[in-house]
Amino acid sequence: MATEVTGFVDAYDALPPQKRGEALRKVVSRATPEEKEEAASVLGRPSSRARDVLWFVVFGILAAVIIGGGLLGVRADGSDETALYGFVGIALGAVVGLLAPSPGGRSGG
């Protein structure tokens, strides 16, 4: 089996860089859920710094939508701002949803 794996890796290495992504997509699409879980455990989780950057980007965008929408709502003199308030409400709901604990998470007890 080790020689089969080595052959597979060598064949992957022989692919041109622009074809490697397509090859990986095909391999992953054919993998069983157990194989995908094993691959994810081997690859590991993103670093703490990467997660922090992602949270900063997500919350930054949502904060910009909330603040920008609020400012536009204040400046909308007599125009129909209902859609704007709905959009800001959705962004605010997204922030609350991201901060809420997962119902499937571990209990604190």
Image (cartoon, rainbow, N blue to C red):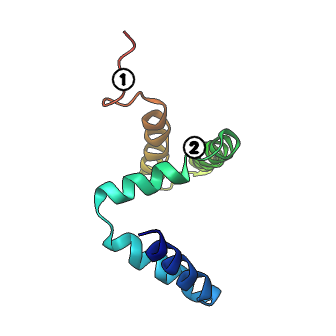
Disc 2 crowd, CA 10 A, few/some/many (<14, 14-19, 20+): many
Query: Nearest the camera: 95 or 12?
Result: 12
**Front residue (pair 90, 45):** 45
Instruction: Please state which amino acid type lies under the numbered disc 1.
Output: Arg
Question: Could you tell me if residue 15 is visible in this image?
Answer: yes
Q: Residue at x 61, y 82 (%)?
A: 13
Q: Is residue 65 left or right of residue 102?
A: right
- Disc 1 is placed on an element classified as loop
From what the image shows, is residue 100 above or below residue 27?
A: above
Marker disc for residue 106: 1
Return the disc, 2 or 1, that comes first in the chain's sequence. Answer: 2
Tell me where residue 43 appears, x and y as whole percent. 54, 54
The residue that disc 2 covers is 66
Amino acid type, mark 2: Ile
- Please tell me how crowded label 1 is: few (under 14), some (14-19), or many (20+) other residues with Cα within 10 Å: few
* SS label for mark 2: helix
Is residue 81 something one can see in this rendering?
Answer: no
Splitting the image into 4 quarters, where does residue 15 fall?
bottom right
Q: Is residue 48 left or right of residue 91?
A: right
Q: CA distance from mark 2 to mark 1?
A: 31 Å
> Could you tell me if the residues under marks 2 and 1 are in contact, i.e. CB atoms within 8 Å?
no
Q: Is residue 71 above or below residue 27?
A: above
Q: Position of residue 27 (x, y in %)?
A: 40, 75
Residue 94 versus residue 57: which sits nearer the camera?
Answer: 57
Horizontal relation, residue 82 to residue 14: left or right: left
* Circle number at residue 84: none
Q: Residue at x 31, y 54 (%)?
A: 34
Q: Which part of the image, by quadrant, shows the C terminus?
A: top left
**Residue under the point 41% across and 53% down:** 38
Residue pictured at 50% horizontal, 80% vertical:
7
Question: Split into 4 quadrants, where in the image is the N terminus?
Answer: bottom left
> Where's residue 84, x and y in %?
48, 52
